[in-house]
Image (tube, rainbow, N blue to C red):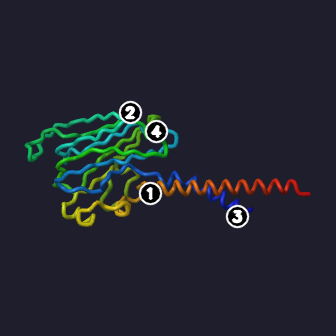
Amino acid sequence: MLRKLLLAVATAFALLVAPALVSARVHIDPLQAPKGGFAKLTFHVPNERDSASTTKVDIKLPTDHPLAAVTVEPKPGWTVQVRKTHLPQPIATPDGPVSDTTSEVTWSGGKIGPGQFDEFSLAAAQLPSDVDQLAFPAVQTYSNGEEVAWVDPTPPNGPEPSHPAPLLKLVNADQLARSVGGGSTPTPEERSAALPEGVATKGDVRTVRMIAVVGGVLGLIGVLVAGTAFARLRRSP
């Protein structure tokens, strides 16, 4: 009886801590890209609220180190709005100077429900070569009107803020090739090891869900056994 009771308590604890384990931040994938090169940037957006859905995602693109060209991947169910900014100094490209850059991309009209996440992608051509990282401040809007701003800068040697802006590290092409094993695609284990602390991966979510399901089954068995024992005690003289 005591063993079953302990199992039920463990189950309740697993269900309570599961939301905290899968809680994550808005982050960018990949974590690094080649200077002066091309990259597909995917923003991973989790819903951190139990009673509201994410209905809008706004991403600010750098204008101090602008991107020469940006195209947005279509996303069914969402409306995208792209804002341009005129540059005081044009960007030199093989196809000629570029005087306007994309400064903001907003996805709206869709829904990311509680306990879910979604991904929003764009392609960036001719990444800057004169800087080591780019910040992409993001604002996440919920159906109840709440806004969460992932905009805080991360100091080089200080503690990470509670709402850091997504960061993309820029490295030389040879460094990037070495970091992923001679230019091969990084494995899920390599990506997980490189993620900032506190970022939940898809594997983490699957593991937590499995723990919750197993715990729930064991807890149910414990309740049934306890009920049966109690009924027998009542029937006995």
How many marks can you see?
4
Residue 135 in the figure: left or right of residue 4:
left
Q: CA distance from mark 4 to mark 2?
A: 11 Å
- Contact check, label 4 and label 3, Cβ < 8 Å: no
The amino acid at mark 1 is Gly
User: Is residue 111 visible to the viewer in this orientation of the structure?
Assistant: yes
Residue 232, quarter of the rendered image: bottom right
234 vs 189, left or right, is right
Q: Secondary structure at mark 2?
A: strand
Instruction: Compare marks 4 and 1 and give the one earlier in the sequence.
Output: 4
Q: Earlier in the sequence, mark 2 or mark 1?
A: 2
Could you give the CA–CA distance between mark 4 and mark 1, rounded to whole angstroms? 23 Å
3D distance between C-alphas at marks 4 and 3 = 39 Å
Depth check, mark 4 against mark 1: the one in front is: 1
* Residue in the picture at 27% in, 64% down: 180
Q: Which mark is residue 3?
A: 3
| Residue hosting label 1 | 203
Mark 3: amino acid? Arg
- How busy is the neighbourhood of tag 1: few (under 14 within 10 Å), some, or many (20 plus)? few
